[in-house]
Amino acid sequence: MMNRQERMIDLIDQMENMFSGHPWYGQTWIESLERIPVDRINFRLAKGPSIASLLEHVVIWREYVVSKLHGDTGAHMEPGMDWSEEEISDTAWQELVRRLVESQQELLEGLSELPASELQETVPGLAYSWNFMLQGLIDHDAYHLGQINLLTKQVISA
């Protein structure tokens, strides 16, 4: 069983590997986003979300966690705040990618400032621990990265 310091290192390693490192499962965020043709960011299958809306959803949740790491006890997520089905422009896509990169930097900075002794403490304003929220964010990122890669595969092979 990991102690709290080892767990903090593990969370940071997972975030770094998924973003631009060497994840065991395949492509990182950076590698995946580089493969997406910009003229296909609004591609969707049937009534599902587009590549752009999936990325925006991920970014919104990352920014929410960053706000919590910065001590914003009033930050909350209302149902539907995290999804948009509107098509976006190439410029908006570039801004979304920039926000993803910025959120990665802010998450890693926030984690470096969070004492490992607080991992099991309740996140202010929420009913669960920092460890639960941070692992949930990693799992959430992995899930949606998989969806984006599946959609990208459809776009490239179409």
Image: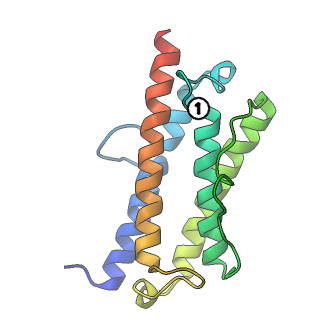
Residue at 43%, 63% (x, y): give it.
136
Residue at 42%, 85% (x, y): give it.
116
In this rendered view, identify the residue nearer to me: 101 or 135.
135
Residue at 71%, 79% (x, y): give it.
74
Pinpoint residue 66: horizontal percent, then vertical percent.
Answer: 63, 69
Q: Residue furthest left?
A: 1
Is residue 95 toward the left or the right of residue 145 in the image? Answer: right
Is residue 94 toward the left or the right of residue 47 in the image? Answer: right
Q: Residue furthest top?
A: 158
Pinpoint residue 44: horizontal percent, then vertical percent.
Answer: 57, 24
* Vertical arrangement, residue 117 with respect to residue 112, above or below: below
- Examine the image and state in which quarter residue 1 appears: bottom left
In this rendered view, identify the residue nearer to me: 58 or 128.
128
Q: Which residue is mark 1?
A: 51
Amino acid type for the residue under numbered disc 1: Ile
Pinpoint residue 75: horizontal percent, then vertical percent.
Answer: 69, 73
Question: For the image shown, how many numbered marks are present on the structure?
Answer: 1
Is residue 134 toward the left or the right of residue 97 in the image? Answer: left
